[in-house]
Each structure stands twice: as C-alpha cells, then as structure tokens.
Image: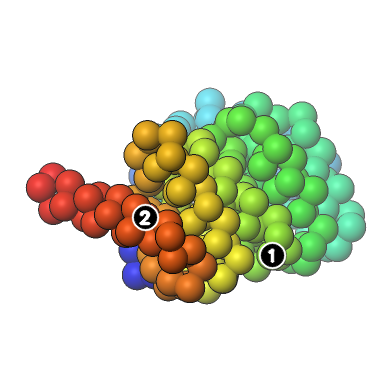
Amino acid sequence: MAETTASSSPPPDPRPALAGVLDPAARAWLAGSAAEVAAEPGAVRRLFPAVRRRCGRGRLTAYWTVDEAARAVLLTALPLRGRTLADEVTRLHRHGDPAEQRAVLRTLPLLDLGDLALPLVREALRGNDTTLIEAALGPYAAVHLPDAEYRQAVLKCVFCEIPLDRVSGLDARADRELARMLADLAHERIVAGRDVPRDVRPVVRAFPDVVDTALAPALMDAFNEADVLKEED
C-alpha cells in the first residue's frame, strides 16, 4: 500500500503559509474578519463569500489553495461547538459556490464536529463534481465515514478517474472487502477490453486471496503491464 500518500492526519494550520503570500491589506482584512467572526458568528455568512475577492486564489500548499486556507481561518474562528457549529457550517456549504463548498469540506478536520458533518461529505459523494469528491475524501472522511461508504467512495474515485493517492487514509482503511470490490472491477474492465487503473494494484495485491484463481493470470498480467508502462514513462 505504499503508493498512496494522502494522510488521515489533520491538515496543517494554514495561517503560517498565508502570512507569507498575502499582501498587507489582505492580511489586515483576514485578521479583522476572523476577529469579527469570533465576536459575532453570524458575520461569517457575509465574510465567507468575500474571501476570494479580498485574499485571492491559487495554490498555497499541497492541501490548501489561498482562498480555501483563508476561509478555513474564518471557520476555525467561529466560537461555536457541536450542533450549533454543524448548523452554521452546513448553511455555508449549502449556500456556497463550489469553491466555498471545497473550503468547508477541507476545513472539517480542523473543526470539533464528530460525526455531525457526515451529511456534507455524503452530499459531495453523491454528486459528480470531482473536485468536491476529492475534497470530501480528506482526513475527516478517513476518520468518520463508515466502512461500507468509504469503500463505495473509493470505487467512485476509480470510476471518476480521481487518483487514489488523493484519498485520505487509504493505507489504513483498505481491507479485504475493498480489495475484492476492486478486483471485481478490474476483471470487468479486462473483459470489456478496458485499461485497469494502476492505483488499484496496491490494494488488490495486499489481499491476493480475493482474486479468483481462474482470473488471477489476467489480472496479474494487466497489473504487470501497467508496471512496465510506468517504468517506460
């Protein structure tokens, strides 16, 4: 399983990275906005959509974009807990555009929500926006999503061509049942003359007994061919 890289650990605090890229005006706006949210939680509904205009966008770290990180600062400033916090986060997600929804999903592991935010993860996983699916399968889902739903989410990533190294917690959560499901999917693709995604290999190989003896040569040949192609690249 060494090929997966996304961790189930909480993402890094975005504030140090933001401090290095925001200009003085943006830093002042974000600091003032976070203080306003801490004093009056309802202010986040007005400030959250304004982040891109005031702070910008673009890649900040491997995990955060600039606007996601700035929105995470506002969310973590909320002086709310439990259901009250979940309701406010849900409101922001439901009324937000995709960029705002991604920010909410990526910030979930930094919030003390327990299982209360799982409906937001499930909503993203039911959709077809691959950026939201990827954001939903971060460290929060790795910890809280039930096994059966986690397995189905991994399969959806394969169907949507989302690399599995972007699914948090796969090293720890891949089990025999997921390997069986991926082996069945691989076999279906072989029969249909389609390529087998390379990144299902570590899961299937970790549980070789899930591969039917009659299917093993075809599956292993497909995996070995993928290895050769990777080396040639």
Q: Is residue 107 visible?
A: no
Quarter of the rendering containing residue 219:
bottom left
Percent x, y of residue 71: 60, 43
The residue that label 1 is drawn on is 147
Q: Position of residue 88 (x, y in %)?
A: 82, 46
Mark 2 highlights which residue?
A: 219
In the rendering, which numbered label is found on residue 58? Answer: none
From the viewer's perspective, tell me whether residue 9 is left or right of residue 127.
left
| Amino acid type of the residue tagged 1 in the rendering | Asp
For mark 2, does the 10 Å Cα neighbourhood hold few (<14), some (14 to 19), or many (20 or more) residues?
many
Labelled pair 2, 1 in contact (Cβ < 8 Å): no
Note whether 66 is above or below 50 in the view shown.
below
Q: Nearer the viewer, residue 47 or 211?
A: 211
Q: Label 1's element? A: helix
**Residue at the left extreme of this rendering:** 232
Residue for point 13% across, 45% down: 233
| Distance between mark 2 and mark 1 Cα atoms | 25 Å
Which quadrant does the N terminus fall into? Answer: bottom left
Q: Residue at x 63, y 35 (%)?
A: 100
